[in-house]
Image: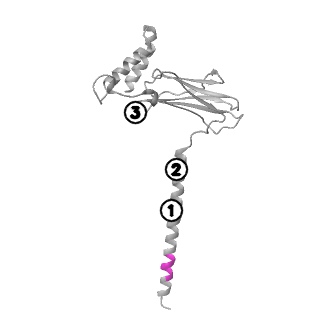
Amino acid sequence: MGGLAGFLGGLLLLLPSLGVPAEKMLAQFTFVQRGLGPEGGPGEDAYDVDREEQFHVTVYPKNPVALGEPNWLICVADSFSPPVINLTWVKNGQEVKAADETDFFPNTDQSFRRFSYLTFVPNAEDIYYCRVEHWGLAQPLTKEWNADSAEPLPETKANVLCGLGLVVGITGIIVGIVFIMKNRRLNAANVRRRPM
């Protein structure tokens, strides 16, 4: 699949010079992909997916927000295919340049994920948008973020490990207390049985 994606990406670079619109070529590629689906025969019925329902766009800060302190905004576009997408940052209605953008990361369902990063200094009046454009969308998806928005995504893995450590620790303490109590009872019984 990686070779096919590389071939498709190279082909997309050549299409404008050949006078072929990229959207037309991608639509044909998608139809072929759908036509070869394992669930049915040829045509659109073989791969029934509504792309707009699959798209996920999330915007969140890297660190907890403190007004006036430099931070990063992260825009994640997820569950899109093929790997051709534009992520654009807008601040108060004006386009701004992203600090960094990742390559495409594959998902297990053969869709892709991409991250875009923007450095910023939070201000109560500023409103940021991450605009996502993809040929599979009827119109661009736009997600808003401002200083009043929700905090960053929870650090689930760290929280689970901490909770697991706490449970193991408490279980160890309880087992230790049970062994100490049994040992004391056995010692007390042995003291009574000894001849004087």
Which stretch is magenta?
Answer: 183-188
Mark 1 and mark 3 residues within 8 Å of each other at the beta carbon: no
Q: Quadrant of residue 39?
A: top left
Say which label, 2 or 3, has the lower sequence index: 3
Mark 3 is on which residue type? Asp
Which of pointers 2 and 3 indicates the residue nearer the eye? 3
Instruction: Say which label, 1 or 3, has the lower sequence index.
Output: 3
Q: What type is the residue that disc 2 sits on?
A: Leu
| Residue highlighted by disc 2 | 161
- Residue at x 52% of width, y 49% of height: 160
Q: Please report whichever mark, 2 or 1, sits nearer to the chain's N-terminal start.
A: 2
Under circle 1, the secondary element is helix
Q: Which mark is residue 109?
A: 3
Helix, strand or loop at mark 3: loop
Numbered marks: total:
3
Residue 24 in the image: x percent, y percent?
A: 41, 14
Compared to residue 149, the image places residue 141 above or below, namely above
Say few, some or many: other residues with alpha carbon within 10 Å of mark 1 (under 14 / 14 to 19 / 20 or more). few
Q: Which mark is residue 171?
A: 1
